[in-house]
Amino acid sequence: MLQAELDKILVRDSLRLAQSLPAVWQAVYALREDFAAFRGHFPDYPILPAFMQICMAQHILFLALKRELELTRVSVAKFTGRAGPGVNLQVSCSAVTGLSGDAQGWDCALRVCGREESGNVFSADISKFRLFFRN
């Protein structure tokens, strides 16, 4: 169900390999008013929950790598901004090199982009975290 909700807001044809070595995958989500993650978080001031930001990064990696990924750990997590309805969210995931053992790591960053009522364009980093998956 979560994947279906994320598929609805993924901007068509936005998933791309931005760099090949190390791999960097990027995609854009359009955060609509009716996106399920805004229900209850918070009713009068909807913001995108941190767990959904992690799910979005995992979602683009699932689509890019074309396989299920078992999340084992989240580290170095910093959620410094917020995203609400009506903006686009760019998600970037960069492969972490030099890991030993049975782990695969990705450094993820989320950036909110939009246009103010005045017409000015804005963008700002809202979170960064590292995801680890079992190989």
Image (cartoon, rainbow, N blue to C red):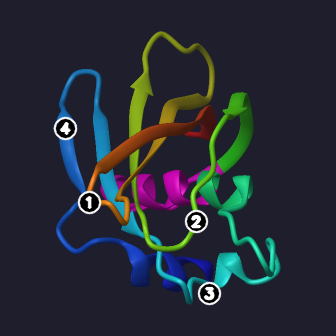
The label nearer to you, 3 versus 1, is 1
Q: Residues within 10 Å of mark 2 (few under 14, many from 20)?
A: some
Query: Magenta residues: mostly which secondary structure?
Result: helix
Mark-to-mark CA distance, 2 and 1: 18 Å
Residue at 68% in and 77% down: 38
Residue at 82% in and 80% down: 40
Q: Residues within 10 Å of mark 4 (few under 14, many from 20)?
A: some
Residue at 42% in and 65% down: 87
The label nearer to you, 2 versus 4, is 2
Q: Which mark is residue 119?
A: 1
The mark that comes first in sequence, 3 or 1, is 3
- Judged from the image, the secondary structure of the residue bearing numbered disc 1 is loop
The residue wearing badge 3 is 1
Q: Position of residue 135 (x, y in %)?
A: 55, 39
**5 and 39: which is toward the camera:** 39
Mark-to-mark CA distance, 4 and 3: 28 Å
The residue wearing badge 2 is 84
Q: Position of residue 22 (x, y in %)?
A: 29, 22
